[in-house]
Image (cartoon, helix red, strand yellow):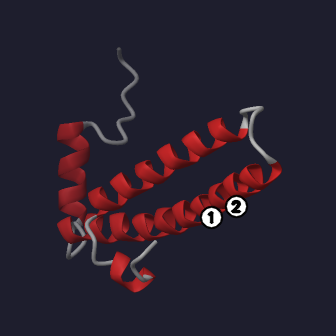
């Protein structure tokens, strides 16, 4: 990752998800390369090192993405919904419905 972790918190969550997916593709390709029989020991070691680094970077991005997603979700309910709003949503959109009819 070329950007610092603090800068990552300013990136929208959807862009972070795209970066995570890119790391997943890199890791998948790297693991496929490691399965090849024609790799030298040095090439295999380099591939393992790259894979481990990408796993770490993807995990860091996932942590940042989780925080950013939570922050973005809070934007829509700031201040938090009142009990009246919660009851309205439950009644009209059947959140937490106790009715078992099908």
Q: Residue at x 24, y 56 (%)?
A: 86
Image disc number at residue 12: none
Q: Which residue is mark 1?
A: 53
Quadrant position of residue 6: bottom left
Name the image quarter holding the C terminus: top left
Q: Nearer the viewer, residue 6 or 67?
A: 6
Q: Residue at x 36, y 76 (%)?
A: 8
Q: Residue at x 29, y 59 (%)?
A: 15
Callout 1: 10 Å neighbours few (<14), some, many (20+)? Answer: some
Q: Is residue 12 above or below residue 10?
A: above
Residue 82: x and y in percent read: 22, 67
SS at mark 2? helix
| Closer to us: 46 or 78 | 46
For this orientation, the residue located farthest to the top is: 102
User: What secondary structure is found at the residue carrying circle 1?
Assistant: helix
User: Foreground mark, 1 or 2?
Assistant: 2
| Residue under the point 42% across and 50% down | 22
33 vs 11: above or below? above
Q: x, y percentage for residue 55?
A: 61, 58
Q: Which mark is residue 49?
A: 2
CA distance separating discs 1 and 2: 6 Å
Whether the residues at callouts 1 and 2 have beta carbons within 8 Å, the answer is: yes
Residue 49 horizontal side relative to residue 73, left or right: right
Say whether residue 28 is left or right of residue 68: right
Q: Which image quadrant for residue 85?
A: bottom left
């Amino acid at each position: 990752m070329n950007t610092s972790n603090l800068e990552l918190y300013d990136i929208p969550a959807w862009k972070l998800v795209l970066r995570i997916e890119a790391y997943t593709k890199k890791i998948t390709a790297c693991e496929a390369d490691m399965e090849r029989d024609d790799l030298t020991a040095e090439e295999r070691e380099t591939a393992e090192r790259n894979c481990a680094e990408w796993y770490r970077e993807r995990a860091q991005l996932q942590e940042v993405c989780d925080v950013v997603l939570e922050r973005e979700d809070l934007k829509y309910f700031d201040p938090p919904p009142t009990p009246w709003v919660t009851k309205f949503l439950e009644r009209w959109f059947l959140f937490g419905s106790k009715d078992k009819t099908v």
